Amino acid sequence: MENPSIANILLSFLRLGFSAFGGTAIVFYIKELVVEKNKWLDAETFNDGVALSQSLPGATAVQVATYVELKLQGIKGAGAACLAFCFPAFLLMFLLSYAYIRFQNLPFVVSLFSGLNLIAVAIIANAVYGFGRETLKSRKDLLIALASLIFLYIGVSPFLVIFGAALLGIFIYKDILPHKNVGLIKNGVFHVKHTIILVLIFALFLFALYVFNDGLFELCGVLSKISLFSFGGGFAALPLMLHEIVQTRGWLDHKTFLDGISLGQITPGPVIITATFIGYILYGFLGATLGTFSIFAPSYILLIATAPLSDRIKASLFYSRAANAVVITFVGLLAFVALKLSLSIHWGATKGLFALLAFFLLLKRVDILYVVVGASIVSIFIFS
């Protein structure tokens, strides 16, 4: 296997970051780059990274990119890959957020967002269907998903729902057995030392915000908490964002939040890049930058901490059962987001048909980029 230079890592993942449409689907293209084209890792090692990334909170594609370069170049490589992969999404979302503030009341922009909002709801509904089809395999699964939806609807915090589901999963999923092959922990002291350093740096970052700017401290604290509970990929952050940003603190209304999700669909990278939009709306460029850092940093640190322990994590009976329940809960949480955002739209026959058509195209696996671009153009004309 060939070890690439840091410069090669930056260029490769920067290029990939500009074309990373489709959320978790980009993992396929990372594998193509790393395993098939450049042969930096073998398929087995790469698949271990995907399994670990799916077990941790945060955007799966970003976690996989980080894991790959952690294997190749250590901490420096992981940081370089994460920055390069996320920068295009941050840059484009920042520019779109700036344009949104300046031009959101122009007639053609209003028409554009009428269509984009419908597309965003269709994408979330398709995610509910896709994740549900993959994860709901028994009555227990269905009951947990429905219970999480009901508890959210009556006002229970999604953080409590996730924690409760994890505890319940330990007791009801007795048929789930842990992974038996437990490997040795390599460079354990090395990773512990660097994890402690990263945690201290992040704690100092939050402390500095607490001292100098209460608003930015609260924003970054909330986004950090969301990052640590976003099991199931980037979409899992949406219910938590809706609860914390819209319902609990009222920083954004439902429409503005939906507009942010819509912009997240026309930019490459994970949907949690919506954090850039939220930060910009509240505190301008500084809010966008620090908010983006806060949504990615905790899950990055967690991956650095757990990578050498991946086999032992998979061998934990409690973790295997709890993680299964948390992922199932995500189906109900995401269904709640689709419901709440749907209620914020003023529906009519044209909008209903438009959303159904978008949902059908996504269901038939038409590339999400084609759906978003095509629907954006059509919406300017039919919703004007």
Image: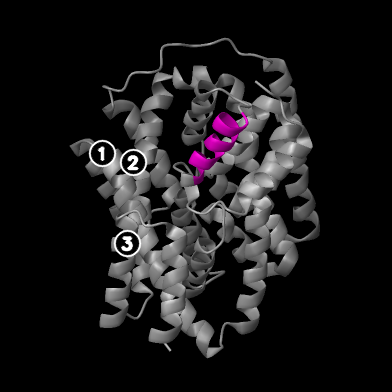
Q: Is residue 340 above or below residue 321?
A: below
For discs 2 and 3, the disc positioned in front in the rendered view: 3
Residue farthest to the left, as pictured: 139
Secondary structure found at label 1? helix
**Residue at horizontal 58 percent and vertical 10 percent from the top:** 184
Relative side of 120 to 188, left or right: left
- Of residue 189 and residue 164, the one placed in the foreground of this image is 189
> Which image quarter holds the N terminus?
top right
Across and down, in percent, residue 16 comes to 61, 47
Point out which mark residue 247 bears: none
Regarding mark 3 in the picture, which secondary structure is present there? Answer: helix
Q: Is residue 30 magenta?
A: yes
Q: Quarter holding the C terminus? A: bottom left
Q: Which residue matches tag 1?
A: 141
Q: CA distance from mark 2 to mark 3?
A: 25 Å
Give the mark nearer the N terminus: 3 vs 1: 1
Spatial CA span between label 1 and label 2: 6 Å
Local secondary structure at mark 2:
helix
Q: Quadrant of residue 172?
A: top left
Q: Give the amino acid type for the residue marked by disc 2 in the picture.
A: Ile
Is 191 on the left or on the right of 28, as rendered? right
Q: Mark 1 near mark 2, Cβ–Cβ under 8 Å? A: yes
Q: Which residue is mark 2?
A: 328
CA–CA distance in space, label 3 to label 1 = 27 Å
In the image, what residue occupies the spot 71% across and 16% down?
189
Magenta extent: 26-38
User: Which of disc 3 and disc 2 is earlier in sequence?
Assistant: 2
Residue identifier under label 3: 361
